[in-house]
Image: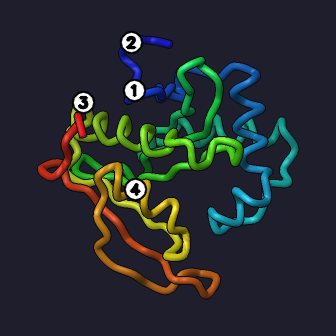
Amino acid sequence: MRPDWPRFGRVTLKPMAEGLSEEEWRGLYDTFRDPEVAEWNGASPLRTPFWLFKRFVLAENRRKDRLAFVILDEEGAYVGTLELYNLTPEEATLGILLKRERWGQGYGTEAVRAALAYAFGPLGLKRVRLRTFAHNLRARRAFLKAGFREVGESPGPRGQRDVHMEVRREDFSPQA
């Protein structure tokens, strides 16, 4: 793990642009195929073959409006994925997926903290936003703990309510 990669607590965010190990590719693929992870992400489990999935991810990584990372734990093992997308010079939207086996262990909160410090530091963004399901209380608590605040609700695509959250650079404390 390189010292310039974003980190907080036990996690390191490895830029996908640096290339992924076979273990990281498999972890990423399995995360997107997990039905429970997909359900909490408002999606269907991935059914694409591995080779095509890799091609899609590599193509997405070339986009100028997103930065994607794999989340590594203190041992360097794959925990999940995080991205900043809809990236502009002022703001981005945050998305995160964790392996189900790592839920409730604090890795998500730490990964979000690392991403926010990077977004407000080297990237110089002014705001980071996200949207999550209102009924996903575990995720909402983690985002609040990481520094987000709830700014509104809207109807979601599957009849559930979505909660809109954001954090602004002036309200973020990298040490908290």
Q: Which amino acid does label 4 sit on?
A: Phe
Picture disc at residue 7 = 1
Picture disc at residue 3 = 2
Q: On the rendered structure, is 141 left or right of 166?
A: right
Q: How far apart are marks 1 and 3 (CA)?
A: 13 Å
**Which of pointers 3 and 4 indicates the residue nearer the eye?**
4
Q: Position of residue 96 (x, y in %)?
A: 53, 49
- Asked if the residue under mark 1 is in contact with the one under mark 4, i.e. CB atoms within 8 Å, the reply is no
User: Is 151 situated above or below 93?
Assistant: below
Q: Where is residue 67 in the image (x, y as percent from the top left)?
A: 45, 39
User: Is 129 situated above or below 12?
Assistant: below
Secondary structure at badge 4 equals: helix
Q: Which amino acid does label 3 sit on?
A: Pro
Q: Position of residue 79 (x, y in %)?
A: 62, 35
Tell me which numbered mark, 4 or 1, is placed earlier along the sequence: 1
Q: On the rendered structure, is 111 left or right of 117?
A: right
Q: Which amino acid does label 1 sit on?
A: Arg
Picture disc at residue 27 = none
Local packing at callout 4 (Cα closer than 10 Å; few below 14, some 14-19, many 20+) is many
